[in-house]
Image (cartoon, rainbow, N blue to C red):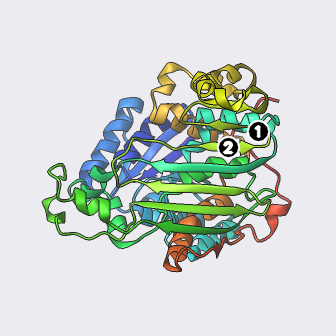
Amino acid sequence: MSEISVGVIGLGQRGLALLESMMACPECQIVAVSDLYEDRRQKGVDAVMKHRNKAPKIYADWKELIYDPQVQAVVISCDWEMHIPMAIEAMHAHKIVASEVAGAYSVEDSWKLVDAYEETKTPIMLLENCCFDEFELLTTSLVRHGLLGDILYAHGCYGHDLRNEITGGNVNRHYRLRNYEHRNAENYPTHELGPIAKILNINRGNRFLRLASNGTRPGVGLEAYTKDKRCIDPTLTHQSFAQSDIVSTTLITEQQQVVTIRLDTSLPRFYAREFTIRGTKGLAQGDQNLVCLDGDIPEIYETNKFYAKMLNNADAYKEKYECDIWKNITPAQRELGHGGMDYIEFRVFFDCILNHKPLPIDVYDMATWMAVTPLSTLSMERGGEPVEVPDFTRGKYREREAQDVVALPK
């Protein structure tokens, strides 16, 4: 088999962007698309026609797409609430699954996801694109080569001013609004947590034991924004929001590493993920494109001047430690979603499927990372008390071999 026939569920802004990255992969054939809204379905058809000159089938009912015999793999990019139910349905239909990211709505849902996989053995991958980003993979390579020493601490953030997107939910038919209205959680944990979990070999020799979350007073930033002239939906002027503007979560691993992540999406700010890895021999900081090894650091009084010189020095490590897939990426491929990392994740997904390789972000990763959301809610409801993170591998993590998302330099 040299091609794989794909059906795409969800053709909003994210789904249409994924179509562009998928169709840059010659092995991908989009044979069906589905969305609740007719205009979005048509946009999906138009996008496929532009690249393939062959119209896909169109479904208003996502279940009809899943049970289409021509569809071999299902890509889920719709509202967060439906990711796990659709993935479970697709696995039971023996359709390979690639699901966009989000948080789960209950720990039970994560268990249902694992149970469906273990019953059907249908391959499933979480499309956490940040695991494929250039700096995150370069840092992973440095860690695997021992340059950062024993890794003890990691940090990440989803820092993104989404006030306009959230409060425009009714106008633009976007699901984030109802999530911010009705629940308080670390609702989008996987961008920051996924690359860290891969580096720490979570579910492959290591695991998260517990987490604790705390949030700011709910709704303050968004409620102020709804009264601002920039808010495009005047019906929200008196709307209250359950979601804290900032949620901070600390996770502890079995190997006694500390991981901190932060959701920060409804106050004025610039975009940042703050990806940071700290070890006994050095550190890596993604937003500064910086690698600092112990022997590089001068006396304390020169540290600030030295720091300024070190910014963007990570490029010097690429020749020896960068993976081939990033070394060989073309300018056109970099122009695809999120600087090329969306394209790379699909190249890996299709390669694994066509060559019968294990998927690098599997059901146990998906269940664990997504469960952070309901666990954070539980912790905040208990005043920030630590709560246990389930072992979704049921003990298999002890024997599972480490697996990076791409082949790294030896």
Q: Are marks 2 and 1 in contact (CB under 8 Å)?
A: yes
| Viewer-side residue, 327 vs 11 | 327
Task: Classify 10 Å Cα crowding around label 2: few (below 14), some (14-19), many (20 and above).
Answer: many
Task: Give the residue drawn at x 48%, y 50%.
Answer: 158
Q: Secondary structure at mark 1?
A: helix
In the picture shown, does residue 101 fall above or below 301? below
Task: Classify 10 Å Cα crowding around label 1: few (below 14), some (14-19), many (20 and above).
Answer: many
Q: Amino acid at mark 2?
A: Ile
In the picture shown, does residue 408 fall above or below 364? above
**Quadrant where the image shows the N terminus:** top right
| Viewer-side residue, 317 vs 28 | 317
Image depth: mark 2 or mark 1 in front = 2
In the picture shown, does residue 49 fall above or below 57? above
| Residue 50 seen in render | yes
Answer left or right for 398 relative to 313: right
Residue under label 1, please give it. 143
Task: Give the residue drawn at x 25%, y 63%.
Answer: 223
Total numbered labels: 2
Q: CA distance from mark 2 to mark 1?
A: 9 Å
Task: Give the residue drawn at x 63%, y 46%.
Answer: 195
**Mark nearer the N terminus (2 vs 1):** 1
Image location of residue 110, percent across then percent down: 59, 70
**Quadrant where the image shows the C terminus:** top right
Image location of residue 178, percent across then percent down: 32, 66
Q: Amino acid at mark 1?
A: Val
| Viewer-side residue, 138 vs 289 | 289
| Numbered label attached to residue 279 | none
Residue under label 2, please give it. 277
The answer to which image quadrant residue 404 occupies is: top right
